[in-house]
Image: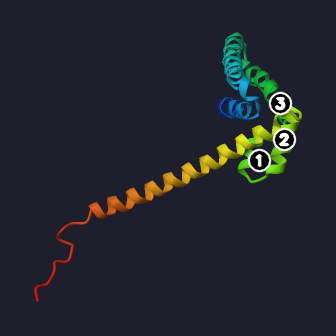
Amino acid sequence: MNDLLVGRFIVGLGVGSASMIVPVYLAECAPPEHRGAMVTCMNVALTFGQLISCVIAGVFSTTPEGWRYMLGIAAVPAVIQFFGVLFLPESPRFLVQMGKIEQGRRALESLRGTYAVEAELGDITKAVLDEREAIRRDIEVEEQERVSALEATRSPITTPLPVNS
């Protein structure tokens, strides 16, 4: 039974990670006019895969030691995805965030050819800079709120009173 729990935990981590990471990667690498459709198709495919997984689990639920087959079958798409990821370019947006603008340009060219790469790279760079500025402003606001909250908690008793001279 421990093997089953460990196996299900590992499969759960894999499916959870894929359902979170793949849509983000697709959105960062897809042409702007196709992003929504690609992410939607990916989510539908993931949901369909979970349905198929449940059907397969139902089929093997009556088989002795069927859980081993379930986990073995679940490993097949995971292995395919693992080796497929090795051939994917890094996300141009990620590279720009890391300050690797030239590598981001090359990754974008590998995804789009030379079509409108400079314009899209400029959009990505602007978006990254805007995000950094928004984060910086949020941090400043949080610091100001923390200081204000600290000042509000001061008791009038602990505040020194002026001494009459």
Identify the image quadrant of the C terminus. bottom left
**Residue lying at 51% horizontally and 53% vertically, measured from the top left:** 137
Q: CA distance from mark 3 to mark 2?
A: 25 Å
Which sits in the foreground, 52 or 19? 19
Residue type at tag 3:
Val
Judging by the rendered image, the residue that carries numbered circle 2 is 107
- Secondary structure at badge 2 equals helix
**Residue lying at 74% horizontally and 25% vertically, measured from the top left:** 71
Which sits in the foreground, 6 or 34? 34
Left or right: 119 as drawn, with respect to 156: right
Q: CA distance from mark 2 to mark 1?
A: 9 Å
Judging by the rendered image, the residue that carries numbered circle 1 is 95
Residue type at tag 2:
Ala
**Residue lying at 84% horizontally and 48% vertically, measured from the top left:** 103
Residue type at tag 1:
Leu
Q: Nearer the viewer, mark 3 or mark 2?
A: 2
3 and 2 marks in contact (CB < 8 Å): no
Quadrant of the rendered structure where residue 136 is? bottom right
- Sequence-wise, the earlier of marks 3 and 2 is 3
Task: Find residue 21 and report its horizontal and vertical position in percent.
Answer: 69, 35
- Sequence-wise, the earlier of marks 3 and 1 is 3
Q: Nearer the viewer, mark 3 or mark 1?
A: 1
Left or right: 114 as drawn, with respect to 137: right
Judging by the rendered image, the residue that carries numbered circle 3 is 79
